[in-house]
Amino acid sequence: MNLYQLLEGLQCSQVPADRQIGSVVVDSRQVKPGDLFVCLVGERVDSHNFAAKAVEQGAAAVVCQRDLGLDCQVLVENTRAAYGIICCNLFDNPAKKIRMVGVTGTNGKTTITTLIHHILQDCGHKAGLIGTVYTEIGDMIIPAKYTTPDPMVLQSTLARMVQAGCEFVVMEASSHGLDQRRLEGCRFETAVFTNLTQDHLDYHHTMENYYQAKKLLFGMCEKAVINLDDPTGRRLLEEVDCPCVTFSTSNNAADYTANDIQPSQLGSNFAVVGMGVISRVKLAMPGDFSVSNAMAAISCCVGLGLELEDVCRSLTNCPGVKGRAELIHRDETGMIIRDFAHTPDGLEKILAALRPFAKGRIVTLFGCPGNRDATKRPKMAKAVAQGSDFVILSSDNPRDEDPDAIIADALVGFEGMDVPYVVMPNRYDAILWALQNRRQDDILLLAGKGHEDYQVLKDETIYFDEKVIVENLMNHRQ
């Protein structure tokens, strides 16, 4: 492909003569003769510093956001945004050939995208899925590395979905991905907002920055679906320019509202009322937060042109979402549930969902992730202490932080609380102890890992699927 074809749609203040380009590269170590090298500014590394070396290795052109004095430089305002558009052009703009749905917010993204994808497929529409757990293209499942992929991976994936005949793609839009302009060049038919609670402040530093990153999605869409129950959702509703549809689990002022919610131990039965129509859903996921997630999916799919009755029927057929309020074991003693809750709000909501049906204790095993926002650790512990009858404080993904130091941060949240707890840094040992000390009618909640089948330690990443671990330990006891 020629340089000018790759730069189409970009505002450039300096461009060399057109030339043939071999491939597009962002790592100077991978540059080959004829490549286009894009200089990205990261938190630790600024690859503008390696541009001259890339030219020495044969780069045909260099995209940069400051003048490097190179004859072959392409000067742009923001190289991350430019890289997104270049990748779009490289793959012939696949986002223009598929109906795109994006979901953003702190909690609920994976559940909502999975539900929307299920509804579309069940109603006869071929759809791709891009998210935290995996990417799905037809019958192909690809494990996910990032919630929102790098532009090169994203655009190549969208191109494969177009080639596979997908009419829709449903994807999670993370705050990191939006802030780093990974979605540049994409236009979404519908964007969904779930909620905003504390998370990722190690990256964004302030909640306002976090909000502004999420808000970027709503400048890239034709219409928005917004949670009217969330204070930030109500703010977003006032600030976006596109047409909006709202949903709620309690407010009849919303366009779509869940009424007559009948909760059960493993799900909810509720009516959807809106736009002059009504239908009923039996959802195989417990808690008001799950009803809210379902309402987001319903509102989105009706906006995409599906009939409400068909949407609700499809949701009733949905078995649930992996690692989200997922029942992984049940016996005469009680239940074991795993959930991805890793924020104070997420923990509070899953515990509130379980409380009405707890005949015995709610025992929560959780940890706080390393190399992530440390200020939420005591808040997570406090949320768990308030919602549980017994707590096992362990590790999540400590990464290269000291697990004991992470636990010490979390322990502050137990101050003034009278919930009994034990501390067991080794998560496998903690699970084993929890199983050995179960009491009649206990609900054991394994919080934080959810769908993950690995644990990130200081020097290695190990296989760690809690569903498999529980199954093996329970079978070994029998």
Image (spheres, helix red, strand yellow):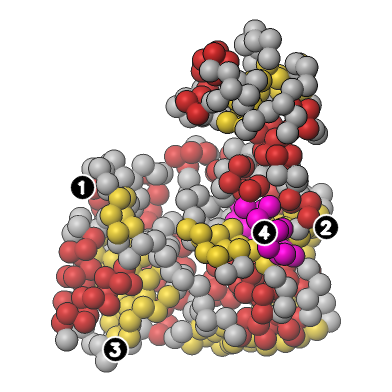
Mark closer to the chain start, 1 or 2? 2
Q: Which residue is mark 3?
A: 331
Q: What kind of element bears circle 3?
A: loop
- Residue at 78 percent across and 28 percent down: it is 4
> Above or below — where is 170 with respect to 42?
below
Residue lying farthest to the top in this orientation:
69
Asked whether disc 4 touches disc 2, contact meaning CB atoms under 8 Å apart, the reply is: no
- Is residue 72 in view from this perspective? yes
> Above or below — where is 419 with respect to 395?
below
Callout in the foreground (4, 2): 4
Look at the image and give the residue range highlighted in magenta. 157-175
Disc 4 packing (10 Å; few <14; some 14–19; many ≥20): many
Q: What kind of element bears circle 4?
A: helix
- Residue at 50 percent across and 49 percent down: it is 146
Badge 4 amino acid = Met
- Find residue 433 and report its image quarter: bottom left
Mark closer to the chain start, 3 or 1? 3
Q: Which residue is mark 4?
A: 161
Callout in the foreground (4, 3): 4
For residue 162: magenta?
A: yes
- Which of the labelled discs sits on residue 404, or is there none? 1
Badge 3 amino acid = Asp
- Which of the labelled discs sits on residue 243, or is there none? 2
> Above or below — where is 469 with respect to 91?
below
Q: Position of residue 160 (x, y in %)?
A: 65, 56
Q: What kind of element bears circle 2?
A: loop
